Amino acid sequence: MDCKGKMHNKTVIITGGGKGIGFGVATAFAKEGANLVLTGRTPSTLEKAKDSLEKDYGIKVLTVVADGGDEASAQLVAEKAMEAFGRIDTLVNNAQNSKSGVLLVDHTKEDFDQAIYSGLYATFFYMKACYPYLKESKGSVVNFASGAGIVGKVGQSSYAAAKEGIRGLSRVAAAEWGPDGVRVNIVAPLAMTKSLEQWREAYPALYEKTISDIPLGRFGDPETQAVLPLLDGDLAQIMYACTRGTLRSDMVHWKPGSACCVIMASKGYPASSHKGDVISGLDAVDDDVVVFHSGTKKVDGVYQTHGGRVLGVTALGEDLKAAIDKAYANVRRISFDGQQVRSDIGAKGLRHLT
């Protein structure tokens, strides 16, 4: 598919763009025709994302293995983007690496440096490196903060410090760069990432207290398998509006009903993962059920496991119970050696509704 949307021939840099939230953002921009520069630390993850995005959307993707906490690396990314595409229109600072579930008094300086350099310093370095080109294109910056810093989550001191620093940096940059036509915005998601899973395991009581205040009884999913099928509209247009500062409440609409996504994980997950197990039954799922491939690889026409979170089986229903029942009915049609499937997906949501 060749996409010629609102971002056609424009260039977007996304740090940590090879997986999770970063890859979701990359997909949204790809749908609008943007050429992408994806950075990260794992070449294989970046190349897999590049192949998928170029094949599905007909755009160009440049991957750069880089450590954003090093100023020279950030500068190199900006230079490579200009060499490849001749312009930079949007910078998305998504990447962050930190210890989770470690009390402040147990943090080492190395732990704290890890969060500050990968988050705050990386954001600072990328913004400085890209500023001259963003000024020329009248572009935009989207920085990621976190609810962990805004609320103050136990066991998240270094992560929260980095994210609160990014919030302050972003507010100042918005004031200083606004006269140059460069917009700077902040997104503060609270999604069930690997770091948050570690925090949940370290502080289960605090986790339960936190989600008790959330109507759905859970955090968001960074891969949004359970949410996107209910979106009545174009995610790419919504993301584009966010970067332009033009998003309005009447631009986001949802279909009636409920959705449920059940993750099928490989043997050993989350401590490890298993690759090469043949997946059967994918052709047996209902036509209206979406199976998201998170950790698979196609070898000689056959899908195999290639990661921890292998598949996300997502079904819709007139209510949550119907969606859950349909998702699990289709999960039972799929199999691979060592598969792991939780049996309580949606249970907390049902309790909140009764």
Image (cartoon, grey):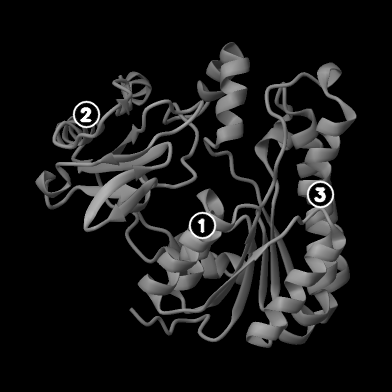
Q: Residues within 10 Å of mark 1 (few under 14, many from 20)?
A: many
Q: Determine crowd level at label 3: few under 14, some 14-19, many 20+ residues with C-alpha closer than 10 A.
A: many
Q: Is residue 132 above or below residue 207?
A: below
The type of residue carrying mark 1 is: Phe
Q: Secondary structure at mark 2?
A: helix
Q: Which mark is residue 321?
A: 2
The residue positioned 47% from the left and 72% from the top of the image is: 30
Q: Quadrant of residue 129?
A: bottom right
Measure the C-alpha gap from mark 1 to mark 3. Answer: 20 Å
Residue 37, quarter of the rendered image: bottom right
Q: Is residue 173 visible?
A: no
Amino acid on which disc 2 is placed: Lys
- For mark 1, what is the residue? 23
Question: SS for tag 3?
Answer: helix
Q: Comparing marks 2 and 1, which lies closer to the viewer?
A: 1
User: Contact, CB < 8 Å: mark 3 with mark 2?
Assistant: no
Query: Relative to 293, is 325 on the left or the right?
Result: left
Residue identifier under label 3:
120
Q: Residues within 10 Å of mark 2 (few under 14, many from 20)?
A: some
Residue at image coords 84%, 72%? 177
In percent of width and height, residue 91 lies at 68, 68
Q: Is residue 348 left or right of residue 212?
A: left
Measured as percent of width and height from the top left, residue 237 is found at: 46, 70
Q: Nearer the viewer, residue 328 or 150?
A: 328
Name which residue lies at 50% across and 84% down. Answer: 8
Looking at marks 3 and 2 on the same chain, the residue that comes earlier in the sequence is marked by 3
Q: Nearer the viewer, mark 3 or mark 2?
A: 3
Q: Quadrant of the N terminus?
A: bottom left
Q: CA distance from mark 3 to mark 2?
A: 42 Å
